[in-house]
């Protein structure tokens, strides 16, 4: 998520430079910067510094600013959708022919084009997890988090679908593209007043998203450092502002470096890939947390090894079912993404789907749900277990395989860096590991004292 802020600042910089100052800054950068600073964007760096200062002030400053920006953003979206639906043509949806390659009709690039576009634009959904990440800032999280989560998804769904339809209805699809989508469409149509309104709304919106993203990253890094998995100075809280200032500074510097090293398109693909990987891991984690995989403790009066065999084998059985599920799911997503859909391939895909479905049915029928012993209520609630989560894994893998290879390579590199940090530092300083080791030493000490007493 650290690289999402620089991506947003680069997009915001493009719009400010193109529509407010007529490309003055970008022209000066090209004329004065050497080739190795080709991606350096002074406006983006300045915006990142503003994000850093606001986050150092505190969460209240961020929340008040976001409320004001949300109103402006909503009005600008309504203006664009109103103008697009009033000035557009239904012919743009399915009759327009691209003079460059002759493509025409609805979905000119077919199913693969739709999936590739969905995977590329998946970064747009990254901010929704901020609701959960900022749970510690809520007054009544038990009441507010479910409302905020479902409300955010509903609002985003309606606005995204409406805006996507409006822009396709407003202008031929082959004219769309670049980093100035909505504003560029209005400018090409000569709609000056709506262009300035939408420009203002877009600037405020991207500013708000970048600000919230940095806030979320800081909270995530703080929680990880608090658990001992990252360097401890990142969890130090300033007594006056109640903000981890060093944390904000480090995340902001990394964001600035990201805006210098990468361009907008590369960052967007990397973020989409990282988000899809996180969603796959999250869906699998929900499946694991939803089922009772605990081994019962053996006592002299309760269970014998024979009666405890079933509960003890539960975890191994679940692992087998999960392997049976993950292998065909991975192959199915790969076949759908890369292979030509011949009759043989389709038959294999159907068989893989049946194996995947059978494994989910076995998990649902053979593994008991994780419930509280006192009242029997589910300790982890999630609808449609495990079928919704299994389908989520398949869809996210399918979108992931449609991303550019270069973005996937960068994603693998950053995953390796993360693993190196974890196994090189976090695993040795983890507070959870230290707590377990302390309990183990206490148990050994008690056992030794008991043996001495008997002797």
Image (tube, helix red, strand yellow):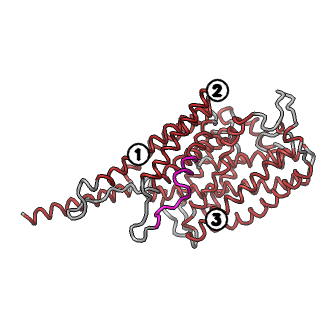
Of residues 41 and 294, which is closer to you in this image? 294
- Judged left or right of residue 239, residue 121 is right
Can you identify the residue that label 3 sits on? Answer: 148
The stretch of residues the image draws in magenta is 377-392
Residue lying at the far bottom of the rendered structure:
139
**Can residue 413 be seen?**
no
Magenta part, dominant SS: loop
Label 2 close to label 3 by CB (< 8 Å): no
The label nearer to you, 3 versus 1, is 1
- The residue depicted at 64 percent of the width and 36 percent of the height is 402
Where 232 falls versus 143 (above or below)?
Answer: above
**Distance (Cα) linking label 3 and label 1:** 34 Å
**Can residue 350 be seen?**
yes
As for residue 150 lying within the magenta part, the answer is no
- The residue depicted at 35 percent of the width and 55 percent of the height is 433
Of residues 322 and 140, which is closer to you in this image? 322
Quadrant of the frame with the C terminus:
bottom left
**Residue 350 has which mark?**
none
**Residue 319 has which mark?**
1
Where 47 falls versus 71 (above or below)?
Answer: above
Residue 164 image position (x, y, % from top left)? 78, 48
- Judged left or right of residue 236, residue 441 is left
Can you identify the residue that label 2 sits on? Answer: 342
- The residue depicted at 51 percent of the width and 69 percent of the height is 239
Label 1 close to label 2 by CB (< 8 Å): no
């Amino acid at each position: 998520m650290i690289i999402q802020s620089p991506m947003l600042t680069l997009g915001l910089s493009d719009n400010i430079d193109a529509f407010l100052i007529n490309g003055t800054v970008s022209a000066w950068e090209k004329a004065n910067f050497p080739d190795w600073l080709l991606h350096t964007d002074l406006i983006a760096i300045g915006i990142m510094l503003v994000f850093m200062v606001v986050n150092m002030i505190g969460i209240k400053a961020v929340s008040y600013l976001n409320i004001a920006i949300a109103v402006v953003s909503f009005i600008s979206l309504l203006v664009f959708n109103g103008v697009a639906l009033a000035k557009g043509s239904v012919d743009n949806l399915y009759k327009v022919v691209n003079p460059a390659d002759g493509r025409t009709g609805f979905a000119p690039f077919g199913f693969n084009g739709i999936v590739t576009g969905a995977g590329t634009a998946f970064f747009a959904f990254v901010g929704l997890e901020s609701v959960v990440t900022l749970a510690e800032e809520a007054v009544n999280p038990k009441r507010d988090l479910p409302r905020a989560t479902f409300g955010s998804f509903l609002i985003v769904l309606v606005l995204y679908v409406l805006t996507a339809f409006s822009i396709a209805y407003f202008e031929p699809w082959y004219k769309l593209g670049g980093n100035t989508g909505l504003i560029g469409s209005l400018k090409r149509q000569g709609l000056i007043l709506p262009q300035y309104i939408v420009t203002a709304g877009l600037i405020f919106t991207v500013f708000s998203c970048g600000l919230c993203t940095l806030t979320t990253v800081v909270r995530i890094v703080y929680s990880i450092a608090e658990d001992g998995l990252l360097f401890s100075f990142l969890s130090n809280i300033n007594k006056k502002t109640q903000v981890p200032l060093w944390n904000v500074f480090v995340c902001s510097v990394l964001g600035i470096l990201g805006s210098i090293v990468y361009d907008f398109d590369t960052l967007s693909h990397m973020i989409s890939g990282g988000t899809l990987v996180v969603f796959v891991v999250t869906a699998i984690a929900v499946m694991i947390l939803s089922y009772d995989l605990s081994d019962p403790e053996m006592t002299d009066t309760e269970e014998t090894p024979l009666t405890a065999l079933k509960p003890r084998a539960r975890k191994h059985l679940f692992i087998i079912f999960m392997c049976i599920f993950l292998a065909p799911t991975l192959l199915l997503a790969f076949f759908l993404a890369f292979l030509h859909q011949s009759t043989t391939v389709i038959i294999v895909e159907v068989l893989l789907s049946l194996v995947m479905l059978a494994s989910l049915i076995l998990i649902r029928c053979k593994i008991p749900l994780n419930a509280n012993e006192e009242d029997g209520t589910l300790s982890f609630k999630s609808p449609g277990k495990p079928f919704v989560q299994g389908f989520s894994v398949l869809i996210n893998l399918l979108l992931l395989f449609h991303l550019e290879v270069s973005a996937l390579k960068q994603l693998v590199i950053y995953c390796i860096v993360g693993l190196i940090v974890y196994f090189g530092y976090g695993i040795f300083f983890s507070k959870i590991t230290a707590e377990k080791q302390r309990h183990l030493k206490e148990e050994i000490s008690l056992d030794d004292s008991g043996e001495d007493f008997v002797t």
